[in-house]
Amino acid sequence: MTIQPHILVIDDEPQILRALRTILSARQFRVSTASTAAEGLALAAAGQPDLIILDLSLPDMDGIQVCGHLRAWTQTPIIVLSVRDAERDKVAALDRGADDFLTKPFGIDELLARIRVALRHATQTPAPHKTVVTAGPLRIDLAGFTVKRGDEEIKLTATEFKLLAYLAANAGRVLTHRSILTHVWDPADADHVEYLRVFIRQLRKKLEDSPEEPKYLLSEPGIGYRFIADD
Amino acid sequence: MRQIWNFLQDERRVLPAVLAVLSTGAVTVALLALREHFDLAILVLAYMLPVGLSAFLWGFGPGMAASLASFLLLNYYFIPPYGSLMIHQSQHILVLVSFLVLTISISQLVGRMRDSLETARRRENETKRLYDLSLDLSGSLIEHGILNTLARHTFETFQADLVEILLETDSQPEMVSWPVEAGCASPPVALASLQGSQGLLGEIRLWRGEESLNPAESRLLQLFASQGVLALERTRLSSAATRARILEESDQMKSALLSSVSHELRTPLATIKASVTSLRDDSFTWDAAARTDLLAVIEEETDLLNQLVGNLLNMSRIQAGALQLEREWNDLHEVIEPALRHARAASPSHHFEMDIPDDLPLIFMDYTLMEQVFNNLFSNSIKYSPPGSTIRMRAFLVNGIVQAQVINQGPPVSEQNLERIFEKFHRVTAAEKITGTGLGLSICKGIIEAHQGHIWAENLPEGFTIMFTLPIEAEGALPDLPTL
């Protein structure tokens, strides 16, 4: 019997808190809630949650700032909630250390998937990373620098592999344009989204069954990309 | 004394008088040689010439000067005894007095005639200047343009060194100068206030060497000022009227929006409420299929509400001119993909086809807003074309511009409605049959135009299409692409 993960939800909407408490409790999570940033920060320090769900618009403090405060002392995964059209805020929160985001309104299946991925990445941090990532017929060997679809090897250029490897190593998590560009190219190229577009298109052509409707290399409009691997 | 000195200092006044006197001197020199051969009457007549000429050329003053000089010279050189101003014969006195009276009268008459001719010419010039000014002013519809025109005309008409116009406005005073960017530290030689019907609007300041304006010029400057005031007040009135009309229209638009929106919001809410209350009803047990069905309805209607709210938000931004584009280099394939996924989920009964070349260049556009354009175009096509028909999306590059179109097999739209479908709340078919706020296409138009593109509708032999263009360049530049 594993210990129930503890989730802290910080949101100023009582109805969201009520719904999330009910839904997450039913899924065997321990849930605590806070309706202000101050209360949330205090609970995070006292309760040592395994994951924090943080709304970006709070009455007493900017959610992006809350991310910064939390990251000053803890690596607890943070999933930020925000409305559409607030892409800039989401990117800022992700760059400040948030692990993932969800746009309101969201489906619970999406939230649970994000929670799963975030908790997995959190527990993995001290342990060595998985070196082989599988997604449908794709098998990406991060250590061996090979990608196979079934038995057939897919030829990738060095940059294409570097990009795919970064996304696959973070499977399930959103990676911002800036973070990908900095990591795969160079910090000086952090604003060259056009590089990314071209290489993503190339990768999709090589990896996806139907590049027009990708299943593994997903775009997060205005934010970044996410690689979907098998669970 | 000082006045006379000043008067004499003015070379424009003294020089003609000197010339007039010199002309009489010239006549004297000419006549002296022939003194013995001519009768006194001819000599007297000959002296009339410089007097009349001076009065005609330079006016009464110089004419008088010539007249007096002639009188003295005639007396001195031609009335015996020669070489003195003495007169012995009474008939000579008569001749000289008559000469003086006559020449003074001539100077006066000719001078007055000349003055009135001059005045008439000046008036004509003023009228022409005023006419030109008012013509130019009537072409300006903005305050800044009016001020510039007024400053330029003042500058040219008064041969000024610098003209400045200061205008008081609601926010901060506006200053226009001609020539532009010039400045002057000394006080202006002339000022004219722009006196409007509601109070002082501002003033014209004029610099022109040391020379101040003469009364006629001052009057003309006042006329210029009042022409400027007329033009300014006309613009202010008309912009006030335009503002009032826009407010009224936006009021009408808001109430239309509110009634349309409350209807549109209630429809999915009613469905959700009905489904949820049914599921909560303990007195009845739903079988699994019905349960799933009701829940699917709730989810679909929630998504619809979400899309509706997004559209409303963007509409209000477009309306307020506050649509902020977050443009980046984007791949059209990527932008269409989520919209296509939604469309497929929303209408499994339609076929969707994509026709976008692989090598279509990246486009500098706002991903989220363009996705909304495709969402709206797809949802429109789904609404207006029969189930089972095909919805096609095409995009291609023509002369550095991407042209994209969504084609459906819906009924044609009448010629007069092809443009009107992009207006707010316009719906081609009767409102009851088709749901929606009638905002979708007008939002597409707002977004496409914010991207410097055009959007239009066309009937095709076997369907209907909405097309739009997007420039692929960003401020004249293409993306800096890595080598593959």
Image: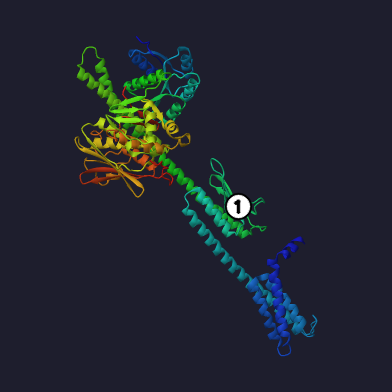
Image quadrant containing the C terminus of chain A: top left
Q: Nearer the viewer, residue B62 or A160?
A: A160
Q: How many marks?
A: 1
Q: Residue furthest top?
A: A1
- Left/right placement of residue B30 relative to residue B333 reads right
Q: Residue at x 37, y 15 (%)?
A: A21
Q: Residue at x 26, y 43 (%)?
A: B465
Question: Is residue B438 visible from the viewing direction of this image?
Answer: no
Q: Which residue is mark 1?
A: B182
Q: Residue at x 70, y 71 (%)?
A: B17
Q: Where is residue B108 drawn, in percent x and y?
A: 65, 72
Q: Image height check: is B446 above or below B266?
A: below
Q: Where is residue B186 drawn, in percent x and y?
A: 67, 51
Q: Nearer the viewer, residue B453 or A108?
A: A108
* Label 1: chain letter: B
Question: Is residue A197 visible from the viewing direction of this image?
Answer: yes
Q: Nearer the viewer, residue B325 or B53?
A: B325
The figure's colour scheme reads: rainbow
Q: Quadrant of residue A50?
A: top left
Amino acid carrying label 1: it is Ala
- Left/right placement of residue B189 relative to residue B481 reads right
Q: Image height check: is B7 above or below B68?
A: above
